[in-house]
Amino acid sequence: MALVTCVTLESVSYHLPDGSSLFTNLDLHIDQRRTGLVGRNGVGKSLLARLIAGHISPSTGHCTRSGTVYYLAQHVSPEPGHTVADLAGVRPVISALERIEQGSTEQADFDCIGERWGIRQQLLDQLAQNNLAHLTPSTPVSALSGGEAMLVALMGAFLSQADLLILDEPTNHLDHQHRRALHDQLLNWPYGLLVISHDRELLEYMEVIVELSSMGLTRYGGGFSFYTQAKAEQLHAAQQQLASAKLERKRQEQALREQRERLERSQSRGHKQASDANQAKVLLGRQKERSQASSGKLRVQQDAAREQLSAQVRHAAHQVEEQQAIFVYPPQACQSVPVQIAEVIDARLPQGAKHMRSINFTLTRGQRIALVGPNGCGKSTLLKVLAGQLPVVSGQARTFVTTAYLDQHLGLLKPERSVLEQLQSLNRQLNEGELRTRLAQLGLNADRINLPCNRLSGGERLKAAMACVFYAASPPQLLLLDEPANHLDLPSVQALESMLKQYSGTLVVTSHDEVFLTAIGVTHRLEASPTGWLITLQ
């Protein structure tokens, strides 16, 4: 079957409001092959996706679409009062159906429906297939967990039947069962597909990997394994070229120094001979002028040669994409931490699956608990209870130490304030220079830390929230982390893993990434089971 181009980018550039360029002269053809878009946090992947979808226009260049495009953003943030139908993007069609069923003959209602007369039943079928049969199109989105909301949003994407589907971090918040189901859906999707993700397992299902970096767009065939191998080989070759260019510059600079020294020795001998010969002052002056002119000409030639050599090194260095090391400082160890950190006794949680709402467990010093289970079982609710943000319906839930809670929606960040301002208000003990250094080591450079948080990428906002949690003046004795690896690029995930492994306090973390949980050294699992919550040794 011939591949049909869905979107073509030609010499596309995008300038930020401050006039700086996010990316320039991008060329890209997206066809019906499953395509993954990868890159570091903040490089502009989500903005590029919005541009491809037609939500924003390029500053220069052209974007041509040959069909319909559906874009699902990485942050599912419905408006207050929105329902499941709104989140799935089918509310207008279902509303038109309801009006026709009530006797409407308005042409606008028929135009809105088009050929989608079965959309309500299709949505109900999708809900049932995803173990969400208890939901209806009119269910408020506020009643959904993060994973359930993502599932509904994905249903809307697949029901759209768009010529090109753009999914931005679609596995965030999904449990193992629904991740596997998503993989199957993507394999069977018959149209164009662009997936923005840092999920290594998901990227293996892609037929093409496109990387966005400071060097532009680079296309790689195959899935994630092929991409990482090709990337490593490419980087190795570029590093060798850079080393060779630096060595050649060193060799040439030595030759230039020797040339200069020979000229200076020759001039010195000439001056001495002329002086010994008692030449007239006017002749000596002319000889000196010729010597200076010769030295000046040589200096100009050598400066030009050095600049050419440096340009060659800079060109070679440009081929080695900057791989900024990410580092996260662990919160300082606390003194006099009690043995008992928290207790939950016959507690009934306010939200979650009905059979999961009753829970008993004790949290002791140094435990590292992985809170696991299917979407909607109440994991985030339990974290909010431990953080003191939600009361239990009955029973007791008490936490005896200072806590720090990083929620999925990064609620602790004030959208209109910069991360530097917020971190300064949380830690008056460290000076601005130290705070800037720590933020830079997180991958938030000087031009990002002064921007309002609502202008940062998803990964950058998560890093900003991490900084506000980990670098506050009062170190937490209990860390409560809800899907902390979501939105992070791989180097940042690895840095977070390293920090959490060093953290000496008590930790409760939710994650569907088993590799991540193993890396941080969890000691126990508090898992949702058919009979309730069960805590076990790892």
Image (cartoon, rainbow, N blue to C red):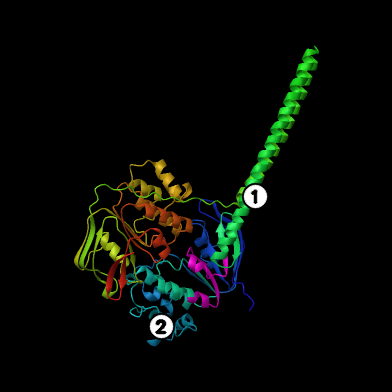
Q: Quadrant of residue 480?
A: bottom left
Assign the C terminus to one quadrant of the image: bottom left
| Residue for badge 1 | 241
The residue that appears at 23% across and 54% down in the rendered structure is: 339
Whether 245 is among the magenta residues is no
User: Residue 323, how many percent across, how many down?
Assistant: 53, 52
Q: Amino acid at mark 2?
A: Asp
Image quadrant containing the N terminus: bottom right
* Residue 254 rendering spot, x and y as whole percentages: 68, 35
Under circle 2, the secondary element is helix
Q: Position of residue 256 (x, y in %)?
A: 70, 34
Residue shown at the point (31%, 73%) measured from the top left: 529
Q: Which residues are magenta?
A: 184-210
Q: Position of residue 428 (x, y in %)?
A: 33, 43
- Residue 455 visible in the picture: no
Q: How many marks?
A: 2
Secondary structure of the residue carrying tag 1 is helix
Look at label 1 and name its amino acid: Gln
Query: Between disc 2 and disc 1, whose residue precedes?
Result: 2
374, 409: nearer the viewer: 374
Mark nearer the viewer, 2 or 1: 1
Name which quarter of the figure residue 224 lies in.
bottom right
**Circle 2 sits on which residue?**
125
View extreme (front): residue: 537
- Quarter of the image holding residue 275? top right
Q: Left or right? Give the position of 355 relative to 439.
A: left
Q: Residues within 10 Å of mark 2 (few under 14, many from 20)?
A: few
Q: Is residue 297 above or below residue 471?
A: above
